[in-house]
Amino acid sequence: MSYLEAIFWGNSWKDCISVNASGYQLPSKYRNKTVEVYITRHKLFVFDLYTGKEIVEYDLSLIPGQIITKRDFRRENEKTLQELKDHVTGMFTGSNWRRFTALNFEAFPRYIRDQCVEAKRYFDSSGIDIFVLDRALEYCLENNTPSFAELNDTYVHFKREHEREELEMPAVSSDYRGSHEPLRVKARGLSVYKEIINSRGTINESL
Protein backbone atom coordinates (compact mmCIF):
# COMPACT_ATOMS: atom_id res chain seq x y z
CA MET A 1 0.00 0.00 0.00
CA SER A 2 1.31 3.45 -0.78
CA TYR A 3 0.48 7.12 -1.11
CA LEU A 4 1.59 9.23 -4.01
CA GLU A 5 0.75 12.46 -5.74
CA ALA A 6 -0.31 12.39 -9.36
CA ILE A 7 -0.79 15.17 -11.88
CA PHE A 8 -4.16 15.12 -13.60
CA TRP A 9 -3.75 15.33 -17.36
CA GLY A 10 -6.41 15.76 -20.01
CA ASN A 11 -7.04 15.55 -23.74
CA SER A 12 -9.98 16.43 -25.94
CA TRP A 13 -12.20 13.57 -24.77
CA LYS A 14 -10.83 12.14 -21.52
CA ASP A 15 -9.54 13.64 -18.28
CA CYS A 16 -7.29 11.16 -16.53
CA ILE A 17 -4.45 10.53 -14.14
CA SER A 18 -1.81 8.00 -15.07
CA VAL A 19 -1.03 5.30 -12.50
CA ASN A 20 1.12 2.27 -13.34
CA ALA A 21 0.82 2.99 -17.08
CA SER A 22 -3.00 3.05 -17.03
CA GLY A 23 -5.31 6.06 -17.16
CA TYR A 24 -8.13 6.73 -14.67
CA GLN A 25 -10.76 9.38 -15.36
CA LEU A 26 -11.50 12.19 -12.89
CA PRO A 27 -13.94 15.12 -12.99
CA SER A 28 -12.71 17.81 -15.35
CA LYS A 29 -12.33 20.39 -12.55
CA TYR A 30 -9.13 18.60 -11.47
CA ARG A 31 -7.43 19.09 -14.82
CA ASN A 32 -3.85 20.38 -14.43
CA LYS A 33 -4.12 19.98 -10.65
CA THR A 34 -2.36 17.64 -8.24
CA VAL A 35 -4.39 14.96 -6.49
CA GLU A 36 -3.48 12.39 -3.86
CA VAL A 37 -3.60 8.72 -4.77
CA TYR A 38 -3.75 5.75 -2.40
CA ILE A 39 -2.99 2.34 -3.88
CA THR A 40 -3.70 -1.04 -2.36
CA ARG A 41 -3.13 -4.41 -3.95
CA HIS A 42 -6.37 -4.25 -5.93
CA LYS A 43 -7.77 -0.74 -5.48
CA LEU A 44 -7.00 2.84 -6.41
CA PHE A 45 -8.41 5.69 -4.30
CA VAL A 46 -8.10 9.31 -5.42
CA PHE A 47 -8.44 12.21 -2.94
CA ASP A 48 -8.59 15.97 -3.19
CA LEU A 49 -5.17 17.17 -2.08
CA TYR A 50 -6.52 20.14 -0.08
CA THR A 51 -9.82 18.96 1.40
CA GLY A 52 -8.90 15.29 1.84
CA LYS A 53 -12.26 14.19 0.40
CA GLU A 54 -12.40 11.07 -1.72
CA ILE A 55 -12.96 11.89 -5.39
CA VAL A 56 -13.30 8.40 -6.84
CA GLU A 57 -12.45 4.74 -6.30
CA TYR A 58 -11.32 2.31 -9.03
CA ASP A 59 -10.32 -1.32 -9.34
CA LEU A 60 -6.71 -1.36 -10.50
CA SER A 61 -6.30 -2.17 -14.18
CA LEU A 62 -4.28 -5.26 -15.08
CA ILE A 63 -3.78 -4.03 -18.65
CA PRO A 64 -1.03 -1.41 -19.22
CA GLY A 65 -2.24 1.52 -21.30
CA GLN A 66 -5.94 0.93 -20.57
CA ILE A 67 -8.16 3.97 -19.96
CA ILE A 68 -10.67 3.42 -17.13
CA THR A 69 -13.63 5.79 -17.03
CA LYS A 70 -16.73 6.42 -14.93
CA ARG A 71 -20.10 6.50 -16.68
CA ASP A 72 -21.19 9.56 -14.68
CA PHE A 73 -18.10 11.54 -15.68
CA ARG A 74 -18.46 10.52 -19.32
CA ARG A 75 -22.22 11.15 -19.52
CA GLU A 76 -22.03 14.62 -17.98
CA ASN A 77 -19.33 15.64 -20.45
CA GLU A 78 -21.68 14.78 -23.31
CA LYS A 79 -24.39 17.23 -22.18
CA THR A 80 -24.33 20.91 -23.00
CA LEU A 81 -23.75 23.37 -20.20
CA GLN A 82 -27.23 24.84 -20.60
CA GLU A 83 -28.82 21.40 -20.35
CA LEU A 84 -27.05 20.77 -17.08
CA LYS A 85 -27.98 24.19 -15.69
CA ASP A 86 -31.63 23.75 -16.67
CA HIS A 87 -31.76 20.33 -15.05
CA VAL A 88 -30.23 21.50 -11.77
CA THR A 89 -32.37 24.64 -11.60
CA GLY A 90 -35.51 22.56 -12.07
CA MET A 91 -34.67 19.90 -9.46
CA PHE A 92 -36.70 21.79 -6.81
CA THR A 93 -39.39 24.45 -7.14
CA GLY A 94 -38.70 26.59 -4.06
CA SER A 95 -37.49 30.17 -4.40
CA ASN A 96 -34.45 29.52 -2.16
CA TRP A 97 -33.28 26.74 -4.49
CA ARG A 98 -33.56 29.02 -7.53
CA ARG A 99 -31.70 31.81 -5.71
CA PHE A 100 -28.96 29.41 -4.63
CA THR A 101 -28.43 27.89 -8.09
CA ALA A 102 -28.22 31.37 -9.63
CA LEU A 103 -25.66 32.38 -6.99
CA ASN A 104 -23.72 29.17 -7.57
CA PHE A 105 -23.49 29.65 -11.34
CA GLU A 106 -22.38 33.24 -10.81
CA ALA A 107 -19.75 32.30 -8.21
CA PHE A 108 -18.24 29.41 -10.21
CA PRO A 109 -18.43 30.41 -13.89
CA ARG A 110 -15.47 28.20 -14.84
CA TYR A 111 -16.73 25.17 -12.93
CA ILE A 112 -20.47 25.18 -13.65
CA ARG A 113 -20.34 21.70 -15.16
CA ASP A 114 -18.63 20.29 -12.08
CA GLN A 115 -21.03 22.11 -9.75
CA CYS A 116 -23.97 20.63 -11.65
CA VAL A 117 -22.49 17.16 -11.29
CA GLU A 118 -22.17 17.73 -7.53
CA ALA A 119 -25.75 19.05 -7.32
CA LYS A 120 -27.07 15.90 -8.99
CA ARG A 121 -24.84 13.68 -6.89
CA TYR A 122 -26.04 15.15 -3.59
CA PHE A 123 -29.64 16.23 -4.25
CA ASP A 124 -31.08 14.42 -7.29
CA SER A 125 -32.88 11.96 -5.03
CA SER A 126 -36.42 11.29 -3.84
CA GLY A 127 -35.17 10.95 -0.26
CA ILE A 128 -34.39 14.65 0.23
CA ASP A 129 -36.21 16.27 3.17
CA ILE A 130 -37.57 19.49 1.64
CA PHE A 131 -38.03 21.21 5.01
CA VAL A 132 -34.40 20.54 6.03
CA LEU A 133 -33.13 21.47 2.56
CA ASP A 134 -34.88 24.84 2.77
CA ARG A 135 -33.22 25.51 6.16
CA ALA A 136 -29.83 24.63 4.67
CA LEU A 137 -30.45 26.85 1.64
CA GLU A 138 -31.38 29.81 3.85
CA TYR A 139 -28.22 29.33 5.91
CA CYS A 140 -25.95 29.14 2.86
CA LEU A 141 -27.59 32.16 1.24
CA GLU A 142 -27.23 34.21 4.43
CA ASN A 143 -23.58 33.18 4.87
CA ASN A 144 -22.60 33.38 1.18
CA THR A 145 -21.43 29.76 0.89
CA PRO A 146 -22.64 28.97 -2.64
CA SER A 147 -21.01 25.64 -3.52
CA PHE A 148 -23.12 22.48 -3.65
CA ALA A 149 -20.56 20.64 -1.51
CA GLU A 150 -21.04 23.27 1.22
CA LEU A 151 -24.80 23.06 0.82
CA ASN A 152 -24.63 19.29 1.22
CA ASP A 153 -22.53 19.59 4.40
CA THR A 154 -25.04 22.08 5.81
CA TYR A 155 -27.98 19.87 4.82
CA VAL A 156 -26.42 16.83 6.54
CA HIS A 157 -25.82 18.89 9.70
CA PHE A 158 -29.38 20.23 9.84
CA LYS A 159 -30.83 16.79 9.07
CA ARG A 160 -28.98 15.27 12.02
CA GLU A 161 -30.25 18.08 14.25
CA HIS A 162 -33.81 17.58 13.01
CA GLU A 163 -33.68 13.83 13.63
CA ARG A 164 -32.23 14.38 17.11
CA GLU A 165 -35.00 16.87 17.96
CA GLU A 166 -37.64 14.35 16.90
CA LEU A 167 -36.08 11.66 19.10
CA GLU A 168 -35.95 13.98 22.11
CA MET A 169 -39.64 15.02 21.93
CA PRO A 170 -41.58 13.60 24.93
CA ALA A 171 -44.27 11.04 24.29
CA VAL A 172 -47.77 12.52 24.50
CA SER A 173 -51.02 10.63 25.07
CA SER A 174 -53.25 10.51 22.00
CA ASP A 175 -56.13 12.10 23.94
CA TYR A 176 -53.97 14.84 25.45
CA ARG A 177 -54.32 18.36 24.06
CA GLY A 178 -52.49 21.55 24.99
CA SER A 179 -49.48 22.35 27.15
CA HIS A 180 -51.02 21.29 30.49
CA GLU A 181 -52.45 18.08 31.81
CA PRO A 182 -56.27 18.05 31.55
CA LEU A 183 -58.15 18.99 34.72
CA ARG A 184 -60.53 16.54 36.30
CA VAL A 185 -64.06 18.02 36.20
CA LYS A 186 -66.88 16.64 38.33
CA ALA A 187 -70.01 16.02 36.29
CA ARG A 188 -73.20 17.71 37.55
CA GLY A 189 -76.40 15.83 38.10
CA LEU A 190 -79.51 16.50 35.98
CA SER A 191 -81.28 18.06 38.96
CA VAL A 192 -78.89 21.00 38.89
CA TYR A 193 -79.84 21.87 35.31
CA LYS A 194 -83.55 21.42 36.05
CA GLU A 195 -83.31 23.92 38.91
CA ILE A 196 -81.55 26.43 36.62
CA ILE A 197 -84.24 26.07 33.95
CA ASN A 198 -87.09 26.30 36.48
CA SER A 199 -85.59 29.41 38.10
CA ARG A 200 -85.38 31.11 34.69
CA GLY A 201 -88.99 30.30 34.04
CA THR A 202 -89.99 31.85 37.39
CA ILE A 203 -88.06 35.02 36.56
CA ASN A 204 -89.75 35.34 33.16
CA GLU A 205 -93.22 34.94 34.69
CA SER A 206 -92.54 37.66 37.25
CA LEU A 207 -91.50 40.02 34.47
Image (cartoon, helix red, strand yellow):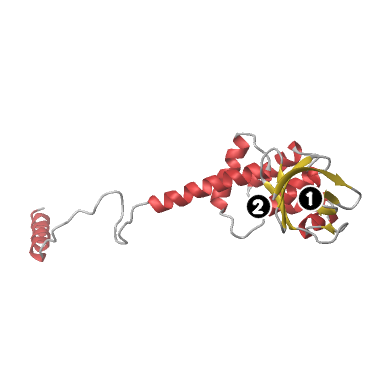
Residue 185's disc is none
Left or right side of 164 for 159: right
Give x and y (percent) for residue 12. Answer: 91, 50
The CA distance from mark 2 to mark 1 is 18 Å
Q: Which residue is mark 1?
A: 26
Mark 1, Cα crowd under 10 Å, few <14 / some 14-19 / many 20+, is many
* Image quadrant assignment for residue 129: bottom right
Q: Quadrant of residue 201?
A: bottom left
- Residue at (64, 34) in percent of width and height: 144
Q: Position of residue 17 (x, y in %)?
A: 82, 48
- Is any part of residue 36 visible from this angle? no
Residue 206: quadrant of the picture? bottom left
Residue shown at 76% from the left, 47% from the top: 114
Between 155 and 67, the one nearer to me in the picture? 67
The residue identified by callout 2 is: 122
Q: Nearer the viewer, mark 2 or mark 1?
A: 1
User: Observer-nearest residue: 90 or 197?
Assistant: 90
| Amino acid at dot 2 | Tyr
Residue 127 in the image: above or below residue 103: below
Outermost residue on the right side: it is 12
Is 77 displayed left or right of 118 in the figure?
right
In the image, what residue type sits under mark 1? Leu
- Say which of 187 and 12 sits in front: 12
Question: Measuring 61% from the left and 39% from the top, which residue is drawn there?
Answer: 140
Is disc 2 surrounded by few (<14), some (14 to 19) or many (20+) residues within 10 Å?
some
In the image, taking residue 188 as reference, residue 147 lies left or right, namely right
- The answer to whether any part of residue 53 appears in the image is yes
Q: Secondary structure at mark 2?
A: helix
